[in-house]
Image: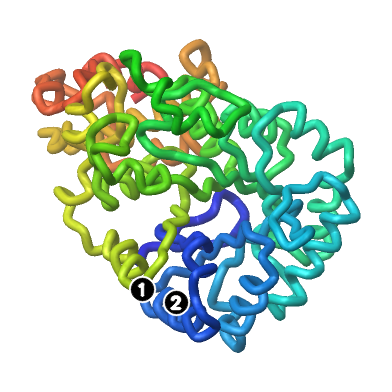
Amino acid sequence: MKYRELGTTGIKVSEIGMGCEGFLLQTEEGYCRFVDLLEEYGINCIDMYTPDPDFRTNLGKALKRRRERFILQGHLCSCWKNGQYMRSRDLAETKAAFEDQLLRLGTDYLDIGMIHYCDSLSDWEEVKKNGILAYAKELKARGVIRAVGLSSHNPQVGLKAVQEGAIEVLMFSINPCYDLLPANEDVEELWNEKNYEQKLLNMDPERQALYELCQKKGVGITVMKAFGGGDLLNAELSPAKAALTENQCLHYALSRPGAASVMAGARSEDDIRRAAAYEDASDEERDYAPALAAMPKISWSGHCMYCSHCAPCPMGISVAEVTRFLHLAEAQGAGESREAIPETVREHYKVLPHHAGECISCGSCETRCPFSVSIIENMKKAAAIFGY
């Protein structure tokens, strides 16, 4: 298992994380078997969005004497009321639910305190007005959580929270189909087939901007909905009317700027093994580019997907990495001034073995690009922006 830094939190998470939906179907013994397998495969990050008391109690038992081996992403504002889940913005309810979470899990801290499910700008303002954000920051100051997070499906909300410096972790829905759609306060629109009937062109610019801003600001992204609830794995159910594999979905999500860990769901032990198998998958098995390029009604033309099909470069340039840093620099207006290049971007570009200025414009990369990207032009832009 490979591990990534979760932004600038100092937390290291496994590339493959685990969502909790499948745990709810297990017996108490089943929880222990699930956690045994996670430990065996090195999966260390568990998302715990559900406030179900049985889930919290059983997971706590399964984690006994090995809590420190796992990164727990717990949710604030996810409450249990009248025997069912409820999202709350009431501070007293939020505090009670959080304290219940710690008690049932048998721990005195969570690694990530995720403000739960905020999909509108007005709701984000309510989170701040009602003291929820202040409470999350208080918990961090007391060492009860290690990092403040936010879960959202709306890039506008994510951008706002990151721009304000309010969060250190963002849980966001990332997959090739959702990335095509503009911001919306109704999460149901992400899987509404009507939104995919017209010809769709390239990634929504706000989503691209969100991922790039997260990388620039050091906000780590934990990914949800990488498989679109499983729909992307089935050609009949997929909004793109073409099936992707689990490895392709995982690799797509992990290739986005800022992404650190994908919360894969598992309803069985075999599901856990299959998710962990991503680490042993070949480049060919992970390769999402041919599938995206062949999707009906969807065109990624001219948009670099960081798939590395352009390789190998005769000069040894990592075209995908150079292009990623180019986009991050351009997002900060670095085309007008090199002083605008974020320090982290500049330093990461600097340590690349080969740079854009070494490009000889042979064009071999462009003949291999599935998305008709103007790579030579991008190399010229990068050389001009970075100076070499």
Mark 1–mark 2 distance (CA, rounded to whole Å):
7 Å
Q: How is the image coloured?
A: rainbow
Query: Residue 68: x, y in percent?
Result: 60, 78
Q: Can you say whether 300 is above or below 234 in the image?
A: above
The residue wearing badge 2 is: 34
The residue lying at 42 percent from left, 57 percent from top is 264
Question: Which class describes the residues within 10 Å of circle 1: few (<14), some (14-19), or many (20+)?
Answer: some
Residue drawn 51% across the image and 28% down it? 189
Residue 229's spot in the image, x, y percent?
Answer: 42, 47
Indicate the secondary structure of the residue bearing disc 1. helix
Name which residue type carries label 2: Phe
Residue 170, horizontal then vertical, whole percent: 59, 44
Query: Compared to 222, does 235 lie above or below?
Result: above
Disc nearer the start of the sequence (1/2):
2
* Name of the residue lying farthest toward the front: 82
Q: Residues within 10 Å of mark 2 (few under 14, many from 20)?
A: many
Q: Residue at 55% x, 35% y: name it.
A: 216
| Residue marked by disc 1 | 269
Q: Position of residue 322 (x, y in %)?
A: 32, 32
Q: Which mark is residue 316?
A: none
Quick check: can you spot residue 94? yes
- Label count reads 2
Q: Could you tell whether 279 is left or right of 34 in the image?
A: left
Relative to the observer, which residue lies in front, 353 or 310?
A: 310
The amino acid type found where label 1 is placed reads Glu
In the picture, which quadrant includes the C terminus? Answer: top left
> Could you tell me if the residues under marks 1 and 2 are in contact, i.e. CB atoms within 8 Å?
yes
**Is residue 375 in view from this perspective?**
no
Is 254 situated above or below 265? Answer: above
**Residue visible at 80% across and 39% down?**
127
